[in-house]
Amino acid sequence: MQRTILIVEDEDILREIMKDYLLNEGYNVLEAIDGKEALSIFEEHEVHLIILDIMLPELDGWTVCRRIRKKSNVTIIMLTARVDEDDRTINSHIRNLRHKLGQKAACIVTVVRAGYKFEGQV
């Protein structure tokens, strides 16, 4: 069964990079450029994972996440460009993970795989 990932990102280049890596790994990819479109796509398709930008036009990522959580427990990976103290701590952990993995692409694919539970397996 092919898994479907919804990428919600308003920056075209970032969305395309993630899409290309995930398609190359065999995932079905859906795309949205704003929060309203993301909710519409989520309602119309079976989505197994969402990669969700926080700062979006129309509805922000937090609002989209809250609305989806009312209906589903789908895995959601939140993306952010914010830079407060908490964000710097999170970014430090991400940099460490990327260093251990050795490749940016591997990081995306590894995080995506870690978010899935295939018939009880992680």
Image: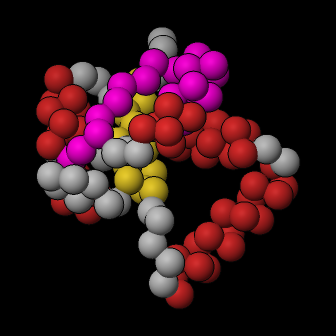
Q: Is 3 above or below relative to 78? A: above
Q: Quadrant of the C terminus?
A: top right
Q: Is residue 24 magenta?
A: yes
**How many marks do you count on the picture?**
0
Percent x, y of residue 26: 58, 16
Q: Residue at x 64, y 36 (%)?
A: 109
Q: Residue at x 68, y 73 (%)?
A: 92
Magenta residue span: 18-35
Q: Is 95 above or below relative to 69? A: below
Whether residue 5 is visible, yes or no, is: yes
In this view, the residue farthest toward the bottom is 85
Percent x, y of residue 62: 26, 62
Q: Residue at x 45, y 51 (%)?
A: 77
Percent x, y of residue 72: 24, 43
The quadrant in which residue 51 appears is top left
Q: Is residue 102 magenta?
A: no
Percent x, y of residue 47: 33, 29
In this view, the residue farthest toward the top is 1
- Say left or right for 95 vs 16: right
Q: How did the renderer colour the structure?
A: secondary structure
Q: Residue at x 45, y 72 (%)?
A: 82
Whether residue 110 is visible, yes or no, is: no
